[in-house]
Amino acid sequence: MINFYSFKNKSYLVSLTLIILTIIIIFFKGLNLGIDFKGGLNFEVKSNLTTNQLNEYFDFIDSDREVLIKREVGSDVFSIRIESGDNNPVFIEEIKNLIDQNPDIEILLSEYIEPTFSEELIKNSIYALASSLLVIAVYVWIRFDWQFAVSGIFALLHDVFVAIGFMSLFNIEFNLTMIAALLLIAGYSINDTIVLFDRLRSLTSNEENKDNFETNVNNSIKLNLRRTILTSFTTILALLCLVFLAPVNLTEMPIVFIFGVLIGTFSSLFLVLGIVGDLNYEAVLKARDS
Amino acid sequence: MIIFKQWRLWVSLLLLIGSYIFIKPNFESQTSDSKINFGLDIQGGFSYLLELNEEEYLNNLLVKTSQYIENTYSISSDIDNGEIVISKNQNLDALTNIVIQNLGLEINEKSDKENSYIFSKQSFNKSLSDMTLNAVEIVRSRVDFLGNKELSIQKVGLNKILLEIPGDLDNNVKEVISKTAKLTLHLEKNNIVGSKTFINEETGEQVRVQEIPNITGDFIQDASLQYNQNEPVVAFSFNKEGSDLFAKMTSENVGSRFAIVLDGSLITAPVIRESITGGSGQISGGFTNETANNLAIILKSGSLPTQIKIIQEKQIGPTLGQEGVEKGVLASIIALIAITLFMIIYYKISGFFTVITIISCLSLLFAMMSLLNTTLTLPGVIGIVLTIGMCVDANVLIFERIRENFKHNIEDPKNHGFNSAYVTILDSNLTTLFAAIFLFAFGFGPIRGFSISLIIGIISSLIVTYIILKLFINITSIKYLGLQR
């Protein structure tokens, strides 16, 4: 049988490396913030022109508005992002009329966000995320012990953070929909973790084998291993369908989520119970005995 | 038959019949309050997020309150930087704490010479929110007059309005919603004191008039597009009070001019030839059919309390939404088939039960969504996919636990296995459920769409695994569950 618990120090090292790599990537590459969080104008257009031709076409736009044109993988759909500047309402109308008149470009979607509002959206997303994390922590704390709450929240933040690093590395746009993807990862991660916590709790409360913490941890993982693999497998199966079939502007989301499932499986198998052990949960169990 | 002794059988049937009844209206053509709406990202359309100017509203409220104090209690005050400053060299006895509180004010600073007051946050927010509700009605009537019937309009936050119009857009919408439409009539005044010059931006015509308006557009009852010598004009009529004021103003000032001002710029400045008692008039001034009609709509609906700014606008073409739905449905079906095949191959008969559980879960989910008149968006579809994942996970947890109990010869493996697995499922699903509820409360846009389907999905999944899956497990002998290996 694999001794998962004995891997914990190596797992910490892996996890630390991932965190440091994420920090480095975000520091050097930054986040590719979409207009939800930066304000500005965004178009999804269908066109038979090349990226270069489109770049030339939009060359007339004032240089203080940055223009970013990107072809969606494997399609004739482009995403065009234009920074906000002075007198936006007039600018929007002008540019829309201009594109409307061009027979080579068809607008599929256009979206404008005022920079003041995007600041509000950032604040709003942070409130939403922070409050739901707090709720998770409190619930786990009430149902289990604080060691579990700390470990569960750590794993969740770890998975979400590394997924953000993944997005930065591949230049995936960070927007409100992606926040939903990150929440999905958070939900998946905490789900996986709690299943293990539950098993560990029931094993440690069993009279016969409660003394050996390490064996209990290994048994919790072993007994759930098939379930963990099956669930990850079916989830990834469903997501792969979405990758190939999602509308062009949404293909990135399932890719990020598949990464999240993998990292979440890693953290629940190798990290969470190790952390619970290192937070001296054994002492809690012993104290309960006497 | 043992099956008929199962209470779960009857509850299952009830659930399925209930789901059928609530899903049915979605496939009927008539409009109903219990249908799933599709978000703009799915059906295509336009959305505008409008923001009313909080600062302007605060200033208006300060002026109004200051005037009220002056008129009611004969106490004069100044407005300075968001505060009402009241000098102490007057009799302030009437200004009791209760009066101050009723005005929504609270003391900000006290000194020997003067007191300064600000609006308490609570009372200002309440007032701001009421103003926005009022503005929602004005915007609604403006867009209604243009003939858009299926629009959805709602207040968001304290001072924002979300307007969503499915399908094609009338180009005039943006024009009509963003105008404040403060119409005022001012008599000509040559004296510098208390007067103001308004300019017509197109013709350059200007006229010096009394700064405080003689009549405002608030008295307008109706307005419409009409033609005067083939030129489009806006005809309007005042209500009783407005008619009286208008008659008085025109009869006392025959021969002089008055200015018609809209949102601070001069439209026209006609000479009063005779007293007008009918309470109606016309505005002419180089309109096209479209601009005259828009102005008539705006005047009819009343003016907005403050300026409006479009802080988010979205236009989703029908192709993208349709493509999204077609591909999304196809992806979901393929994913469902893939999972189904996998579960049946892996778990045999139990896998087949999983399939029934998933389908019941989806029916219950759509039934609840219809009942609550939920709006389904693309992030919402992703929430549903997560729900299916959680439902499959619950099944796997239960089967694995039963299998384990069976292997270790634990007494009553089916019930024990199910119950211990269900505790785990409750713990993990409730954590996610609580998190989703908070996300729904604080989130915006896509986050809300995602969390609402997750909330409903988790509840459905918990119900169907407890009722329907357990029913199948109960009535099947463990030999046939396909779990022993």
Image (cartoon, coloured by chain):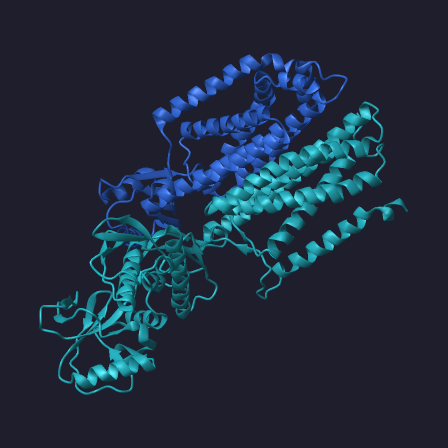
Label tally: 0
Percent of width and height locating residue A281: 61, 19
Chain B drawn colour: cyan
Instruction: Looking at this view, name the residue that lies furthest to the left.
Output: B191
- Chain A shade: blue
Q: Quadrant of residue B74?
A: bottom left
**Residue B90 x, y percent position in the rendering:** 22, 61
Left or right of B467? Residue B294 is left
* A254 w.r.t. B99: above or below: above
Q: Does B297 sit above or below residue B104? A: below
Quarter residue A49 falls in: top left
Looking at the picture, does residue A267 appear above or below residue A183? above
Give whichever of B343, A245 is nearer the camera: B343
Q: Residue at the spot x=39%, y=38% of the render?
A: A71
Of all residues, the one furthest to the right in this rendering is B1
Q: Position of residue A16 (x, y in %)?
A: 47, 18
Specify whether residue B361 is in view.
yes
x, y percent for residue A199: 68, 25
Residue depicted at 82% across the width and 39% down the height = B474
The quadrant where residue B300 appears: bottom left
User: Which image quadrant: the C terminus of chain B?
Assistant: top right
Residue found 45% across the figure and 37% down from its top: A74
Residues B309 and A49: in front is: B309
Q: Is residue A254 visible?
A: no
Q: Which of A208/B124 is in front? A: B124
Q: Is residue B104 left or right of residue B362?
A: left
Look at the picture and state if A251 lies above or below B266. above
